[in-house]
Image: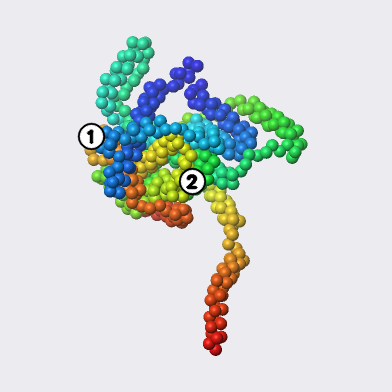
């Protein structure tokens, strides 16, 4: 057993866990304030006030909502399939959260403020206990982990999220839930194809599946090396722009948002797959939707808008996360803006659009990107 | 013994348990979910064997696409729990243990034969090396497989097509009949008017 403990890299594991915890709490805050921002921005669009009572300008509203969710009665209808009914919200949320570990939100090897002092303090505790901890966090990498297949990892896990919605819809044993679940899974399968195919153009420009490398490859030329402008050469721009458009549309459909929110069309299906859910289980579905929105926004930022790249990052590396967040918030704002602006598709329009417009466009774009890449790269 | 080995054994055990669940569950939806668990466990096994690309593909293709369709069909048709059918194929009960013992014997034989298993690949099976193999050394089998899959798709489309020529004719005829039926009272009225005028 001694050899097992020797083979475990404890500083690495503890460091990763701390990073995951910090990142997780941060994402939860983003999700909470995303809901708040959605309500306020929608209110502005619709000429209302929105929630502005809890705290200054209603800034404590998310916490009030959370407390309310927790104290609501948790109703489990009699006819549901209990085990699957309980599992479904978890199956939705866990893959959505697992995806977050691969995103680079800043440069590598960044000096951590007070990192040297903290590590010497921890090492001091270690030596007083007779253990050599060997902790050194004076410089850290601003990502949790980097796979050489980071992008595939993202796609693999996002493709699992559909099960939760599906199982939730079926286990509820209600017509509305089942219809919502069926619609949602049909929609997610259809648009996942276009989503994955649109990314291939970016892969041709970047030449790697590693998200940290993809971001690094987009530095320079005052932002004109971003993949949306063609990455390594401006000649790739047509393919890049088409890829970005296809990605954006299918990402919105993939997260079941307006104007593709057929699975929870309240005029037809009450609330779709989560009709029978209440209290915290409903909150989990709700959270998963917003985490997924954050995920696709982060991926769009990483793949097309240069991730954490921006002016002055090389001298002030902590600007990286700031730029990163600004770009992610731009996409999140776009989601709210669309919700305030566009009406819902009809279901056959949705399917036709996915299979007859988006998918051929994505396929054509792969050929275009390949031709341009051979000519100019 | 490294931590990777512990992960490997744990997920291998989980895969076996889930695989038993696939065949033991009476409710098809539980079987399908158990199969998804098996596929995810296999992905983890690939990961511990330094093949991350295969692991990701395992989840994307099998768990993310094929099993979704399975679950979709099961839920759409709302397949009921299978009744215990003891009357059919009774003789299988007697053959099954023999076959099982033969399988166990085979596995034991091969495990005992393999004295020096090849050392596991320490270099991660990268996408580049895989692509290089696929597009140089194994190009012909790779392309042949893709053609075969394309043929399967075309075949499925052909079998599923409803609009055969004769059916189109029949549908068009039905449409024409329906239109004629709708418009015929007016026609009759017109003709009768004409007759009256004449």
Q: Which mark is residue A187?
A: none
Classify mark 1: helix, strand or loop: loop
Task: Residue at the far bottom: name it.
Answer: B198
For residue B157, which quarter of the picture? bottom right
Q: Which residue, given by chain and number where applicable, does mark 1 sit on? A: A315
Q: Residue A180 carries which label?
A: 2
Q: Is residue B103 toward the left or the right of residue A271 in the image?
A: right
Task: Tell me the residue at 32%/48% (across/down).
Answer: A337
For residue A154, which quarter of the picture? top left
Residue A336: percent from left, percent from top: 33, 45
Report crowding for label 1: few under 14, some 14 to 19, many 20 or more residues within 10 A (C-alpha).
Answer: few
Task: Tell me the residue at 38%/23% (across/down).
Answer: A14
The one nearer the camera, B73 or A49, is A49
Residue B177: percent from left, percent from top: 58, 71
Instruction: Give the letter of the chain under mark 2.
Output: A
- C-alpha span from label 2 to label 1: 50 Å
Q: Judge whether residue B190 can be spotted in this image.
A: yes
Query: In terms of sequence position, does the residue under pointer 2 or pointer 1 come before the other?
Result: 2
């Amino acid at each position: 057993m001694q050899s097992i403990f020797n083979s475990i890299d404890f500083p690495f594991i503890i460091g990763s866990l701390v990073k995951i915890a910090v990142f997780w709490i941060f994402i939860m805050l983003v999700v909470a304030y995303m809901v708040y921002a959605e309500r306020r921005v929608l209110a502005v669009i619709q000429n209302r006030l929105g929630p502005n009572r809890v705290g200054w300008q209603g800034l404590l509203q998310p916490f009030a909502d959370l407390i309310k969710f927790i104290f609501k009665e948790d109703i489990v209808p009699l006819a549901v399939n209990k085990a699957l009914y309980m599992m479904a919200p978890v199956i939705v949320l866990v893959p959505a959260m697992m995806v977050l570990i691969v995103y680079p939100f800043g440069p590598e090897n960044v000096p951590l403020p007070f990192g040297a002092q903290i590590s010497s303090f921890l090492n001091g505790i270690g030596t007083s206990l007779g253990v050599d901890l060997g902790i050194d966090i004076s410089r850290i990498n601003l990502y949790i982990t980097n796979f050489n297949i980071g992008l595939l990892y993202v796609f693999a896990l996002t493709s699992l999220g559909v099960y939760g919605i599906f199982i939730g819809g079926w286990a509820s044993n209600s017509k509305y839930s089942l219809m919502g679940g069926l619609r949602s899974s049909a929609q997610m399968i259809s648009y996942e194809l276009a989503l994955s195919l649109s990314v291939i153009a970016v892969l041709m420009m970047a030449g790697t599946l590693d998200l940290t490398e993809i971001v690094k490859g987009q530095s320079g030329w005052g932002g004109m090396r971003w993949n949306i402008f063609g990455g390594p050469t401006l000649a790739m721009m047509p393919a890049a722009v088409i890829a970005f458009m296809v990605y954006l549309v299918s990402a919105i459909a993939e997260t079941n948002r307006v104007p593709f929110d057929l699975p929870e069309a309240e005029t037809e299906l009450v609330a779709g797959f989560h009709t029978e859910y209440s209290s915290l289980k409903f909150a989990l579905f709700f959270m998963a939707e917003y985490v997924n929105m954050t995920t696709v926004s982060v991926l769009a930022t990483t793949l097309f808008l240069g991730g954490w790249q921006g002016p002055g990052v090389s001298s002030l590396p902590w600007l990286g996360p700031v730029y990163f967040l600004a770009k992610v918030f731009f996409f999140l704002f776009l989601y709210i803006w669309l919700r305030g602006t566009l009406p819902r598709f009809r279901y056959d329009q949705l399917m036709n659009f996915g299979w007859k417009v988006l998918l051929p466009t994505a396929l054509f774009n792969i050929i275009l990107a390949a031709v341009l890449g051979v000519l100019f790269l | 013994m490294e931590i990777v080995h512990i992960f490997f054994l744990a997920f291998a055990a989980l895969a076996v348990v889930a695989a038993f669940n696939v065949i033991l569950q009476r409710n098809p939806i539980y079987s399908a979910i158990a199969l998804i668990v098996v596929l995810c466990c296999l992905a983890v096994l690939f990961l511990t064997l330094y093949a991350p690309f295969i692991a990701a593909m395992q989840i994307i293709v099998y768990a993310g696409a094929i099993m979704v369709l399975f679950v979709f069909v099961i839920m759409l048709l709302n397949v009921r729990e299978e009744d215990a059918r003891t009357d059919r194929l009774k003789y299988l009960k007697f053959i099954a243990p023999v076959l099982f013992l033969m399988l166990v014997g085979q596995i034991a034989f091969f495990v005992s034969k393999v004295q020096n298993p090849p050392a596991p690949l320490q270099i991660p099976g990268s996408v580049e090396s895989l692509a290089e193999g696929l597009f140089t050394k194994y190009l012909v089998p790779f392309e042949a497989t893709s053609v075969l899959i394309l043929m399967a798709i075309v075949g499925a489309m052909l079998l599923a097509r409803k609009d055969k020529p004769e059916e189109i004719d029949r549908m068009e005829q039905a449409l024409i009949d329906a239109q004629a039926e709708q418009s015929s009272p007016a026609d009759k009225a017109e003709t009768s008017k004409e007759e009256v005028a004449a």
